[in-house]
Amino acid sequence: MLENIRLSFQGIWSHKMRSFLTMLGIIIGIAAIIAIVSTITGTNEQIKQNLIGAGDNNVNVQLYMGDSTYEIEYSGIPEGVPVITREVLEEIRGVEEVKDAALFVSRDTYNTIYHKNTGITGGKLYGVEKEYFDVCNYIVKSGRVFDDGDVSNFRKVAVLDEDSAETLFSGEDPVGKTIEILKEPYVVIGVVTKSSKFEPVINSMDDYYMYAQRSSGGVFVPYATWPGLYGYDEPQKLVLTVNNTEDMTAAGKKSADILNSYLSVTDNTIQYKAIDLLEQAKEIQELSRSTNTMLIWIAGISLLVGGIGVMNIMLVSVTERTQEIGLKKAIGARKSRILGQFLTEAAVLTSLGGLFGVIVGIILAEVISKLTGTLVAISAPAAVGAVVFSMIIGIVFGLLPSYKAANLNPIDALRHE
Amino acid sequence: MILDLKHIYKDYQQDKLVVPVLKDISLQVEEGEYVAVMGPSGSGKTTLMNIIGCLDRPTSGTYELAGEDILKYKDKEMSNVRLRSIGFVFQSFHLLPRQSALENVALPLSYAGVKKRERRERAARALERVGLGDRLNFKPTQLSGGQKQRVAIARAMVNNPKLLLADEPTGALDSKSGKQIMELFAALHREGVTIVMITHDKAIASHAKRVVQIIDGEITEGSKEVQDA
């Protein structure tokens, strides 16, 4: 076997140009597959990171009407949807996958929040329980967050996130200052920031619409003061945190089920649903995967063509070496020996091609990554698989020429010119 | 008896015509004999050689090689007979051009499953025996015609075959190299090697101790008296 491999390398080396051209089909096919797979894996990883954030592990559960979120601003307070009580919240906290949970309400803000003449447009106003900041992984940057006193005394105090603080106060310390929310004065008591700052990578307009809202400014007030602003006790939203990113889907679904069990709606399209980012990521990945599967098929065709090229060259090689084969058979080489020799040569040739293909593919993926800025993840199993697959191509397409060689009649073969 | 061929017939099918090539050939060769099979081209001597060399099968007749009825053997066993019992020497040497003399000679040993180190030792010894002990690592392109044929003889002898079968061994050589090869054959004969040599050349055939004349597929003379013809 080793002897055969050594002989194969000798044969390949003695026809460098021909061997290289023969390998080219395999090299191109494997390189294309490696580049595509690396890009897909990278893109998928990126989608996941963008949607889920780095280690944030938050799941939002909120009311839906059909497939879109229920917007209280437009649709009014829904009937049959009770306010979520502390007892229900405790029930949700008891769900196995849920690490912690908090209730909140929120509105998009247009010209509702001002400091002097500066307003926030496109930000969000949140009415939150004091646990909210912990659940959502906020840390206090300056001042403090809400305490029991703020809640029980309906104090008109507000906490800003970094973006809204920047928008309203542009660098000034906002703590102790008064802002105006729906014409009501609120005193800023603190500024918070996400413990893990995560900026989604924006590569396209689609990406921008997808992720941009996550980075806009937010203002938090105690939930207790919310009815003072909007006039109603309205159904809250729920934010969960889980220990494990993989649990996000399960935790969201179980919590939504609990909330739905308290509904007594007439319109049964109104339901709590988790905004399942993991699921969303999967859908987008699925989409990119199906287009890329097609690309892999095309690359596969190139491998097929490469394989046929190998078969062709092996046939030429058998014809060229007819005398050698005849001699070997005459002096006692068995069929299996000749078969093994040519199969090994074909397999070595295509394995080498596969190896070069992997190298070219990795380089290609890196270049694509540099040009488009997408993540590229090179997977070792894919690389090993590619080389093994090339070897199999060599064996499959080497079979016919090797079989032909092994079955040559030594008398005719020796006489062959 | 090394070779015992009886009533060998060989026909070739040419389109719908059956062409008889060998007609009732019977030939016996004793151990240690040096026999030349001589005949003009087209006489069927090459076909006879192919049958003796287990490369081809007769249409009818019996063939025993060292007492073994080899015609009952299948392809795989025939390979084994060629490997262990017969050493071939061809007119055009048939050396592998990219391999050294040593590797060429060691080739049959690798088919016989001999270990690498022993292969090298035995191949080197076989090359020394034909007077090429100083050319072990030369490639065939670096050797003269006579030297190439001696490498081929070393390769034929390396497995200690029962029979050395040579097909026009001097056909591609000048007369001086041809003479050296004949001297080598004579030396091997003296050492007890059984040799069957196929040739059309009377002068070459005369080196053998017995000449068998074959014309039109039939043996016309084969007695020991013609050895000095």
Image (cartoon, coloured by chain):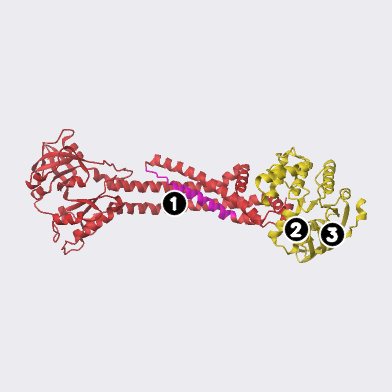
Chain colours: A red, B yellow
Judge from the rendering whether residue A392 lies leftward or rightward of residue A342; answer left or right: left
Q: Which residue is mark 1?
A: A295
Q: Which residues are magenta?
A: A374-398
Mark carried by residue B54: 2
Q: Are marks 1 and 2 on the same chain?
A: no
Q: What's the residue at 81%, 63% (across, down)?
A: B8
Quarter of the image holding residue B81? Answer: bottom right
Quadrant where the N terminus of chain B sits is bottom right
Q: Amino acid at mark 2?
A: Cys
Residue A291, percent from left and from top: 40, 53
In the image, what residue occupies the spot 33% across and 53% down? A282
**Tags 1 and 2 touching, CB below 8 Å:** no
Residue B28's tag is 3
The front one of A208 and B226 is B226
Outermost residue toward the left in this view: A153
- The chain to which mark 2 is attached is B
Residue A299 placement, left or right of A400: left
- Chain at tag 3: B
The quarter of the displayed image where residue B40 is located: bottom right
- Mark nearer the viewer, 2 or 3: 3
